[in-house]
Image (cartoon, rainbow, N blue to C red):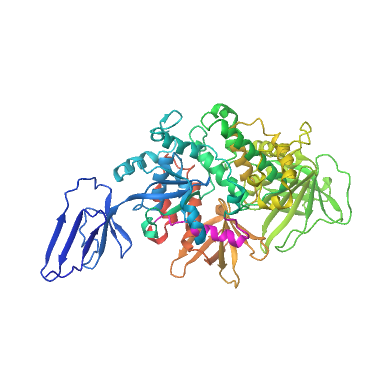
Amino acid sequence: KIHLCLANLYLMSMDISYIHDSRTKCSCVLFLDLKRDWSDHALWWEQKQQWLLRTGWTLDKCGVHADARLIFTPQHKPLRLGLPNGATLKMRACFSSPVFRTVMGICRVLNLRHPEELSLLRPVEEKKKKKDKDSSEELYDLTDVPLTAGAQNNILKKLLIHNLVHYSLYNGMPAHFADSPKTEAVYKMLSVSLPSPAPEAIAKLYRPASIVDKTHIHTRWLDSSRSLMQQGIQENDKLGLRFKYYTFHDMDPKYDAVRLTQLYEQARWAILLEDIDCTEEEMMLFGALQYHIGKQSLSQDMVSSCQGMDDLESALKSLEVKMVGDGNILFCKTYSKKNVLLTTLEKNTVHLIFDHFPPCRPKRLTLKGYKQYWCKFQETSISYYKSKEDRYGEPIQQLNLKGCEVAPDVNVAGQKFCIKLLIPAPEGMNEIYLRCENEKQYSQWMAACKLASKGLTLLDSSYQSEVQNIQTFLSMQRSSSAAPTSQTDESINTHSLVSPRYQKKYKPKQLTPRILEAYQNIAQLSLTSAILKFLQIWQALPDFGISYFMVRFKGSRKDEVLGIANNRLIRIDLGVGDVVKTWRYSNMRQWNVNWDIRQVAIEFDGNINIAFGCVNADCKVVHEYIGGYIFMSTRAQQQSDTLNEELFHKLTGGHEAL
């Protein structure tokens, strides 16, 4: 009579069974004569939720006791990935490595460079009624592409060399996609924009209705320092693959066909689902670009559109942030909010609507006039004087734009060219509006304000290109006099080109001519140029790249929203949605996390200290975001071309990494 063992080794492959009798100290191992490759298998400790990957250690040294349940299972399992373009891809992923390294392996198969910019997140919870429809969704299968443990290590070594290793292409695609028509179809899905889904399918997609809903989106990111199995992910589960960090390094259309397409799709759906706000004119331009990209995608792919690469250097420069320069002086006249309304403007003037008030909604412009001042833009500050003759004396006030928020307030058709500035102040943020006379003046001042907010000056090498990009963007929004006013195109599906807000405001027959009118300005762009232009305009939106979290600051009794961008932290009032305060990473001295009370503490220059706890997310997610952006900023400074994975985990892993 055999007493059931206290320690059982359950083999999921069912090829080996192990029984141990604790009374007689006897063990029995049953081998089934099946030959297969076991190199990808490892032991999973179910109770401790950890992998036993140190094959040179004994079970005793690993801390395994007699009552442990160990599962002998493959490290690479099928996983369903929801891509930014809405397609679902089934492929093998590593369930034993940290998510950071798992994403690297996934991106290597998908031909996505710089995988550190992406991560995995849990899908939005769906109602039970929708699960049946999910099972019939189209599934692209890449499970036949081998990615064993040995192959994974060799792949990762090559993957770390970002700028030196370019993938071997066969018929314009990586070799492992050219094996069969099925894999070729997968690559086309990855590198070419897909047709828009039906309006009924779009209506069922999750759309955040408020800033509170936006905070829930970012609570679903997986921990990059833990494995999939440790976070409860099982074989054939569905996860989303998304760009997490909005700093796109070394973008090269010749090698980044998949990366550009998937980034475009993520930006496109963020706009259509109102995850990021834009003006009406911007929405029409976005719709025109989508329409153009859709038409181009039907006739060519990203590889065949590389003939226009020589004209894309300026567009690519806008995808990265550069930090060099000195200073310069720009003179102009300004107007402050007074009782006199000036209807005639002198050449090269800029209107300054200035008010000191605590954080609140922008005050509407009334019929009250403006008193004229002389304004000087020097270094990163705006100084204004009572008159031109007083410009050599003390200014009435000097506005330091470093660290401020810059947002456009433009209506090209209405000849409205305003710049909204939120300038940090001890009591909060001062709201300022600059109103320019024409497009040229607006382009110069907008470029100067953007650079000043980053601590750069007018002598920076990117100033002229920034001015040119703004002028190009404005010209795209300008109505084309040559375009016929009664254009129609029955093939335009306005539901897939504009957000629901404008679908409710206008009928399709009203939207179609406006989209076609904007289309006249971009109809000559190649497919790659159109995608880059779309991304450039997307990056210029005020709310670009901000991830929201619900937090409670130390000493406060109410919940607030913390926005995390690629260069700053933003404190937002939950009630009215206004920016209360902004802190730049460049002024950050240190940050730490109290893991016992789950509180994040940050110290900035000037003895500024903030501390907060997360309400609807783990503080590890916020800590990883901050550390991740700090890590992204080191990529251009690194002498080596290899990715410093150890540094990433030190900055994002917290006490577990140490």
Say how many tags the image has.
0
Q: Position of residue 57 (x, y in %)?
A: 21, 56
> Quarter-wise, where is residue 547 in the image?
bottom right
Q: Position of residue 173 (x, y in %)?
A: 44, 32
Q: Which residues are magenta?
A: 206-225
Q: Is residue 414 left or right of residue 497?
A: right
Whether residue 562 is visible here, answered yes or no, is: no
Q: Residue at x 57, y 30 (%)?
A: 299
Dividing the image into 4 quarters, which one contains the N terminus?
bottom left
Q: Is residue 66 above or below residue 72?
A: below
Residue 262 forms part of the magenta stretch: no
Q: Is residue 628 above or below residue 487?
A: below
Q: Nearer the viewer, residue 312 or 4?
A: 4
> Quarter-wise, where is residue 523 in the image?
top right
Dividing the image into 4 quarters, which one contains the C terminus?
bottom left
Q: Is residue 107 above or below residue 28?
A: above
Q: Is residue 222 left or right of residue 348?
A: left
Whether residue 85 is visible here, answered yes or no, is: yes
Q: Is residue 327 left or right of residue 605?
A: right
Q: Position of residue 278 (x, y in %)?
A: 67, 49
Q: Nearer the viewer, residue 458 or 266?
A: 266
Q: Residue at x 30, y 63 (%)?
A: 46
Q: Is residue 352 left or right of residue 259?
A: right
Q: Position of residue 590 (x, y in %)?
A: 50, 58
Q: Residue at x 75, y 44 (%)?
A: 510
Q: Residue at x 83, y 45 (%)?
A: 388
